[in-house]
Image (cartoon, grey):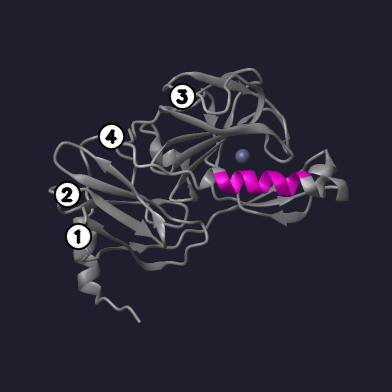
Amino acid sequence: MHYIPLFCSFLFLLLQVSPSFALPQQSLVPGGIAVIELDRIDKTPSFKFQGKPVLISQSADRYIAVVGLPLSLKPGEYFIQGHWGKEKSLQKKFFLVKDKQYTTQHIEIKDKRKVNPYAEDMDRILEEKKRKQKARKAYNKEPVDLDFEQPSPGILTGSYGRRRVFNGQPRKPHSGMDIATAEGTPVKAPMDGTVIELGDFFFSGKLVYIHHGQGLITLFAHLSKINVALGDSISKGQIIGEVGATGRVTGPHLHWSLGLNQTWVDPALFLPALE
Ligand SMILES: [Zn+2]
C-alpha cells in the first residue's frame, strides 16, 4: 500500500504553481486537470499517469506536466511517475483529487433510433467506436502550445460531466462542452494541429479530431459541414467546418471535447476567458 502522511501531501500541493505563461487552469477533481511543475530543467522529463504518457509543456525556465483526470476517478491521492533524460531512477509527483458532483440532465431526442439503435446499426456503431478509441490514443513528442481559443462564438453551456438521461434512459456522462450557436457558424481550430480522424458518425454526426501534439486532442461533433481532410495540418484559427445538428442532438450546437493522456476533460479549463 502506498501511504503518504497528510503533511507531505500538503508539501506536494505547494509544489504546484500559478504559472505566468499560458497554461490551463488546474482543477483537481474528476474531469479536471492537474498542473504540476517539475523541479528539474537540465534534462527532458518523461512522465506517465496510470500508464499513459502525460503532456509536458516547456517554457524557457521550466517544465510543467498537464495531467487529464478521468471523470471516473475516485477522490484521493494520485501521482505521475517518470524520469529525466535517459536516467533510470523513477520519480513520483503527488497530487490530491477532490470529489465533484455533476448534475443530471434529462434530454428528449425525437429520433428514437439514436437512443435505441436498430440491430443493423450496431456494426457501424462498433466500427466508429474503434476509430474513436484509436484517435484518442494519438501521441507524439512535439512541443505543444496551450494558448487555446474558443472554437466558435456562442454560449458556453458548462455542461461537461453532466450525467445524462436520454428519453428516460441513462447514458454515459457528457464528455465535452456544448456551445450553443446557429447552424452554419464557422468552427475554428483552437490551436495548431493535424486532422487524425473525421467522418459522419452515428451518434456524433459529422466530426473532426485534431491532434495538437503529446496526446492533446480536440473533437468537434454534430457539424453540418467539414472543411478539412484526413492528415491536413491545421493552423490556429483555421475554419475546419460549420456548426450543425447531425447525429444525436436536440438542435444545432457545437460539441467540443478535449482529451489529454487519453482522458476527456473539461475544455473550459483551457479557455482564458472562463472562470
Ligand atoms: Zn455535447
x, y percent for residue 220: 57, 33
> Any magenta on residue 125?
yes
Report the disc number at residue 22: 4
Residue at the disc numbered 2: 43
Residue type at mark 2 is Lys
Residue at left offset 36%, top offset 51%:
54
Where residue 102 sits, quadrant-wise, is bottom right
Report the disc number at residue 87: 1
Q: Nearer the viewer, mark 2 or mark 4?
A: 2
Kindly indicate whether the residue at mark 4 contacts the one at mark 1 (C-beta within 8 angstroms).
no
Q: Nearer the viewer, mark 4 or mark 3?
A: 3
The earlier-in-sequence mark between 2 and 4 is 4
Residue at left offset 71%, top offset 56%:
170
Instruction: Decide if ligand 1 comes within 8 Å of the CB at mark 1.
Output: no
Mark pair 2, 4: CA separation: 22 Å
Q: Viewed as shown, does residue 71 lie left or right of 34? A: right
Residue at the disc numbered 3: 233
The secondary structure making up most of the magenta span is helix
Could you tell me which secondary element the residue under label 3 belongs to?
strand
Q: Write the start and end of the magenta stretch as one range.
A: 124-134
